[in-house]
Image (cartoon, grey):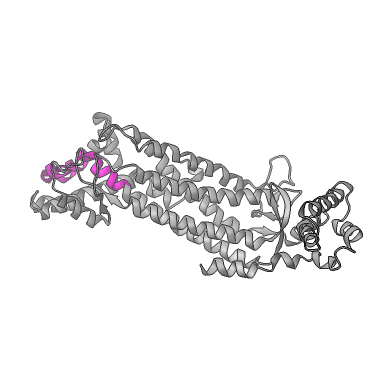
Amino acid sequence: MIERYSKEPMKSLWGQEAKFRRWLEVEVAAARAMAELGIIPSWAAEEIEKRADFSLEEIKEREKVTKHDVAAFVDVVARRVGEAGKYLHFGLTSYDVVDTALSMAMREALGMIIERAENLREVLREKAIQHKYTPQMGRTHGIHAEPITFGLKLLVYTKEMERNIERLGRAREVISVGKLSGAVGTFSQLPPEVEEKTMKRLGLRPAPATTQVLQRDRHGEVLFALAVTASTLEKMALEIRHLQRTEVSEAQEPFSGGQKGSSAMPHKRNPVRCERICGLSRLIRSYLAPALENNPLWHERDISHSSVERVIIPDGFLALHFILEESIDIIANLRVNAERMLKNIWSSGGVFLSQRVLLALVERGWSRDSAYRKVQSLALKAFDQGKDFRDLVKEELGKEIPHVEELFSLDYYFRHIDRIFSRALEE
């Protein structure tokens, strides 16, 4: 991921230094396990743990010769260890180390993502409660429908983030496995006990059955959880973009002092951060397809997944981490124009009341179709002639509906808001 969209500590987690440190952690844990089982000498495991080290430059230089990153890593570390170096990577294959270390990284990265998703959920919850009774026009197909409250909109996002947190947690559980089962998963060089002891040291579970690699349905599930979470962030960002349009002007992302919206037009306050979230969300979702395509490999393993994962896994986590941080700040500091929301509710002449009038006529004995046609004609007249729908209803249906004035109250639409919030927040 480019520097612009990489934030700490996620950035460091996926750096080269951190990757090789995880490989080293796996090698040391495996050596300790083998020593406990009498497979290698105890002194060798102690030397490996004490002296194993590397520099990135050494590994890069060695890889120019080996054309193999794990082999280069093992050569460099073994040289640092000295005589005990012959027991480093003893009986292991490359992906015993690589896949186990990758699981460690993804587990840690998911922990960071979950923490920020929980922060966003809390910010959404607080903002939802704050605007529990702030009237806003609900829109379907981009057209005025019936009034909602802005708090209800945010409550919907709050519950969706809770589901994302659950999905991310399940993905973290699924990927918290490692393997030391050898070249084709048969433990041909080392017994399963080495794997069991090593994974316990690393805080992972042994994968019950593997080939040369952990099966990529696990990684696909992780990328799915990232993609769905990103789609929620895009949903919220897209809504803010619509609400920030000049003609709507109901909400606006934060605009800091000294910020410029355009190099040419000083008046511009564009929703650039929300647009960025939408763009990066598309990128994250695009990584799901290759993640799923990585699952069907030739026989016990080919290398077609490897190059793809070097991009989609670090970049997927970095991009989601970035837009989660953005989303938290945007929602926490969102500018909400409640007056404009109320004004927009009535800007269409009150035609949103049409269903109430329709049902009132049905209750007075009209057929649904005849009532629908009558109310529709009044609504279209209000639209086309710029008249107030309420005035038209009173003029033409006032005698038919004695309590017509009662139909025009906004409170009617919000009478169940308390119950919705109680149900959602107590769930």
Q: In the picture shown, does residue 340 fall above or below 59?
A: below
Residue sitting at the far right: 395
Task: Give the answer, above or below, for where 350 lies relative to 306.
Answer: below
User: Is residue 95 toward the left or the right of residue 352 in the image?
Assistant: left
Q: How many labels, in total?
A: 0
Is 78 magenta? The answer is yes
**Which residue is pictured at 87% across the width and 49% down the height?**
381
Q: Position of 40 compared to 422: left or right?
A: left
Residue at 29% in and 48% down = 22
**What residue is shown at x 60% (from left), y 58% (from top)?**
331
Picture coordinates of residue 267 (x, y %)? 74, 47
Q: Residue at x 71, y 64 (%)?
A: 413
Whether residue 151 is visible? yes
Q: Horizontally, is 357 left or right of 395 in the view? A: left
* Residue 211, horizontal then vertical, whole percent: 24, 40
Image location of residue 377, percent across then percent down: 84, 49
Compare residues 389 and 282 and report the one nearer the observer.
Answer: 389
| Front position in the image: 125 or 153 | 153
**Residue interval drawn in magenta:** 73-102
Res 332 visible: no
Direction from residue 121 to residue 21 in the image, left or right: left
Q: Up-down: is 42 above or below 211?
A: below
Give the dominant element type of the magenta stretch: helix, strand or loop. helix
Q: Is residue 378 magenta?
A: no
Q: Position of residue 283 (x, y in %)?
A: 50, 40
